[in-house]
Image (tube, rainbow, N blue to C red):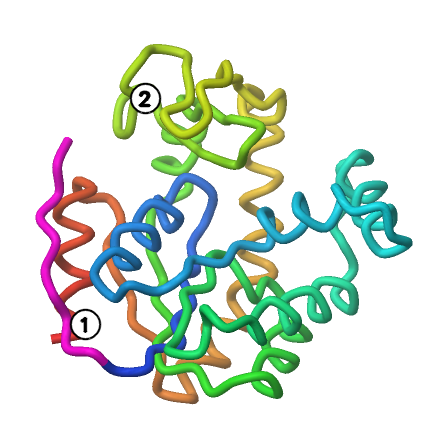
């Protein structure tokens, strides 16, 4: 599917995308990045990059990831801060899924002043439906069997590796547990950014192109 790229007036944008698993926030972040010509930064990508390094910190991150545990806030904050200092973020950036806790939100405030926090809303029922059809790649790319399929069935468009379904994406009880944790963590963050007048909420249960159009309107 081809999406029309709309040129947005050049300004410095410090953007965060939030939303539950399956909301498509990663896809929307990538689409908006093409318009704004900004880097998309996800903690998942930062973790994978760091874990490849033969450093003490890299080994710590790798251990948490391999055990399926969340990387502690202090480590995550330090890694994000270091990433935002890179040259490609000088004119702005898009953060995908960070912050996830109030502690992370507070730490981010010390790094930069956010201009937009975009929350992609979908119901838990829709999230379970979408996640159950999700396909993953070890490079970090994400697809969906119906909504965002790869060009070749079962093969990653980016690196050509075989796609897979995460074990906890195929068990509804595990999915609902993750969503419960998400709501517990995100509700205080939503209120935090609402009070700062930088929160924009989008209905994520539309098509990818319709959601993209709604996101673009925020910047017009």
Q: Are marks 2 and 1 in contact (CB under 8 Å)?
A: no
SS at circle 1: helix
Image position, residue 128 (x, y; %): 43, 32
Q: Nearer the viewer, residue 39 or 120?
A: 39
- The residue singled out by tag 2 in the image is 150
**In the displayed structure image, the side of residue 10 where residue 220 appears, left or right:** left
Give the alpha-carbon distance from disc 2 to disc 1, as whole Å: 29 Å
Image position, residue 10 (x, y; %): 20, 78
| Mark 2 burial class by Cα count in 10 Å: few <14, some 14-19, many 20+ | some
Picture residue at 28% right of the left edge, 29% below the top: 148
Picture residue at 69% right of the left edge, 64% below the top: 79
Image position, residue 140 (x, y; %): 53, 36
Q: Point out which mark residue 168 bears.
A: none
Residue 6 painted magenta? yes
Q: Which of 83 and 219 is in front in this view?
A: 83
- Quadrant for residue 150, please give it: top left
Image position, residue 20 (x, y; %): 45, 49
Question: In this rendering, is residue 30 above or below 80?
Answer: above
Q: Which of 41 and 102 is in front in this view?
A: 41
**In the displayed structure image, the side of residue 168 where residue 201 appears, left or right:** left
User: Quarter holding the C terminus?
Assistant: bottom left
The span picked out in magenta is 1-10
User: Quarter holding the N terminus?
Assistant: top left
- The residue singled out by tag 1 in the image is 218
């Amino acid at each position: 599917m081809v999406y029309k790229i709309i040129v947005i007036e050049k300004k410095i944008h410090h953007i965060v995308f939030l939303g539950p698993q399956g909301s498509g926030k990663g896809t929307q972040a990538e689409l908006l990045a093409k318009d704004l010509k900004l880097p998309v930064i996800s903690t998942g990508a930062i973790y994978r990059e760091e874990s490849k390094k033969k450093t003490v910190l890299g080994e710590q991150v790798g251990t948490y990831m391999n055990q399926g545990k969340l990387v502690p806030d202090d480590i995550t904050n330090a890694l994000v801060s270091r990433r935002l200092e890179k040259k490609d973020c000088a004119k702005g950036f898009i953060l995908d899924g960070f912050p996830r806790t109030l502690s992370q939100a507070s730490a981010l405030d010390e790094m930069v002043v956010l201009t937009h926090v975009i929350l992609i809303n979908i119901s838990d029922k829709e999230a379970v439906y979408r996640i159950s059809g999700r396909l993953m790649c070890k490079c970090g790319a994400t697809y969906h069997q119906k909504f965002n399929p790869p060009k070749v069935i079962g093969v990653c468009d980016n690196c050509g590796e075989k796609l897979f379904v995460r074990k906890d994406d195929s068990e509804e009880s595990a999915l609902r547990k993750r969503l419960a944790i998400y709501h517990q963590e995100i509700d205080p963050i939503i209120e935090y950014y609402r009070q700062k007048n930088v929160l924009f909420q989008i209905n994520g249960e539309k098509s990818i192109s319709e959601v993209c159009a709604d996101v673009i309107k925020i910047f017009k």
